[in-house]
Image (cartoon, rainbow, N blue to C red):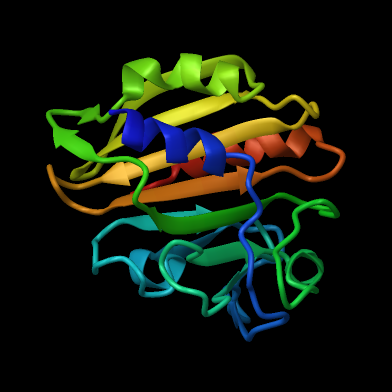
Amino acid sequence: MALLLGPLASCLLAVVLGLPSRPAATPLLSAQEPENSWTSVDFRTATCGYAAADSLTFSLPPGYVVRDPHHGGETGCLWGTAPDLDRALSSKRSVSFERLDHGVFQARLTPNMAYEGSGRFSGESELPAVLADAGMSDVRVARRSFPGHSGLVVTGRRADGLELYMLYLAREAGANVVLINYRTATPPTASDSENWRRFLSEIR
């Protein structure tokens, strides 16, 4: 268990290195959709094809695009407004979420969590203590069911005052676990918690 929890705790606050800057984006809004609408995106698009094909769909906030940094499954996909993604990927050596006008989602495969079946994820009971040791407060860990999938929703407040939003998703025991992080605007806004709640409620 310690082997799983150690990398999990350390990667929560780590910045992923080596992302190329300004890869192509996939626009999500069609000409017929109003600019203030949320947009449905299929699982393959949302994970940039790094995760196995799946029937789940997600809804993304207005004006968001999907961008593939082309850096493998453990970095995965970023979803956000084009200006925010341009800033996040402005360095060739790292990704930075320090200057965001809106929140950015990151969907990726994670080797730091395993799904054991029957709604249970490895180490979920230890997560609050692990995150507290990593400087988090107000930590909440809750199981949640989605169509054909089990989920683990993790929220909290980081030491720098930013909110932590994480969703682990798995279909069956032994399957790859997908982690979706939501990185808040800087500074955070009321829209961040609203975006997270709506995102969870519209997974289909």
Q: Outermost residue toward the bottom? A: 24
The answer, for residue 201, to whether it is visible in the render is no
Give the residue at x 34% y 50%.
111
Looking at the rendered image, the quarter that the N terminus falls into is top left
Q: Quadrant of residue 89?
A: bottom right
Q: Quadrant of residue 158?
A: top right
Give the residue at x 44% y 45%.
202
Which one is nearer the viewer's eye here, 127 or 140? Answer: 127
Please indicate whether residue 80 sits to the left or right of residue 127 in the image.
Answer: right
- Residue 7 x/y as whole percent: 45, 41
- Residue 10 x/y as whole percent: 54, 38
Vertical position of residue 147 compared to residue 120: above or below: below
Vertical position of residue 11 compared to residue 48: above or below: above
- Residue 166 x/y as whole percent: 51, 38
- Residue 125 x/y as whole percent: 34, 16
Vertical position of residue 201 compared to residue 77: above or below: above
The answer, for residue 42, to whether it is visible in the render is yes
Which one is nearer the viewer's eye here, 107 or 136? Answer: 136
Please indicate whether residue 134 sits to the left or right of residue 154 in the image.
Answer: right
Give the residue at x 33% y 40%.
113
Query: What number of labels is visible?
Result: 0
